[in-house]
Amino acid sequence: MSWRSTARSTAMADGPKREGMPLPTKLLVIEDDAHIRRLLRAAIQRAGHVAVEAATAREGLALLDIEKPDAVLLDLGLPDRDGIELIQPIRARSKATLIVVSAREDVSEKVAALDLGADDYLTKPFDTEELLARIRTALRHRLAGHTEQARVVCGDVEIDLAHRRVRRGGEEVHLSPKEYDVLAELAAKADRVISHAQLLRNVWGPAHERRVDYLRIVVRNLRQKLEPDPARPTLIQNEPAVGYRLKTTSRQCTVTNVRLVCPVTASGALYGKRTHRHFARQKQRS
């Protein structure tokens, strides 16, 4: 069966859509390993989405134009091209949210993917619930479009981007200009990892993108002012050696004008012991 017919049959597996019902969300999976594609497809369809599949970079780019997916799950170890090289072409040709799903654990790979435009990076093997949570977050941000969120509320912390105000427990919190700018960058892309270099470029300018010490001082100050326990941060979370994310995916957190979806219940891990061994064999090329 050709890759085009595979994609078509996967989409049709969900059955006919009744008139007036919203179209399901479409995800493009670019992954050369057929076993992993089946596992991803099962998780995606269980969550009510449509899976479109490609086994090579060339097929992936073609399906990107044909299917116009809402989100893309991209493996890096493709047979005809390194997945890192696909990030910018995908960004140039589509507004789909891009999540890298790879066995590569090197920090430099994660930073490169995020700096080139990936919205998130998930390392194989991973749990079903984590995969679906990342997809929900990606789709939530796509629904928000490219406009800035007016307000982000998490627990007793309220970030009002429209008026450049931050409150905690109803009381206004005084932030320095740099502290506010870093928090605003994180809030504008809530739940997504933003690399150190991106934050430094956007807040301090390109000449300072290697001054991670500047950023650490500001984040430490923000945690002192906003976190219930700064030693155990739950709002501003660290992705070691990569960057930071503003964590809002909980039932106490809301973003205005964006629908937060309750977690999809999933049973067990996506990958069992046999699949862990499979990944060990595939890790070098993925």
Image: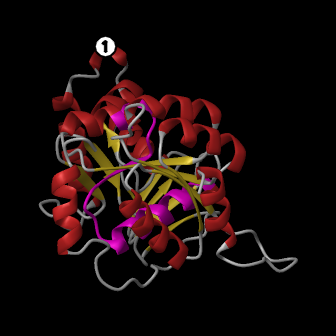
Disc tally is: 1
SS under mark 1: helix
Residue range corresponding to the magenta coloring? 113-142
Q: Position of residue 81 (x, y in %)?
A: 41, 31
Asked if one can make out residue 177 in the rendered structure from this viewpoint, the answer is no
Residue where numbered disc 1 is placed: 207
Asked if one can make out residue 244 in the rendered structure from this viewpoint, the answer is yes
Q: Position of residue 212 (x, y in %)?
A: 19, 30
Q: Position of residue 83 (x, y in %)?
A: 40, 36
Q: Nearer the viewer, residue 220 or 48?
A: 48
Residue 143 placement, left or right of 169 = right
Residue 109 placement, left or right of 57 = left
Q: Residue farthest to the top?
A: 207
Q: Residue farthest to the right?
A: 19
Q: Residue farthest to the front?
A: 1
The residue at the point 45 percent across, 73 percent down is 43
Circle 1 packing at 10 Å, graded few (<14), some (14-19), many (20+), is few
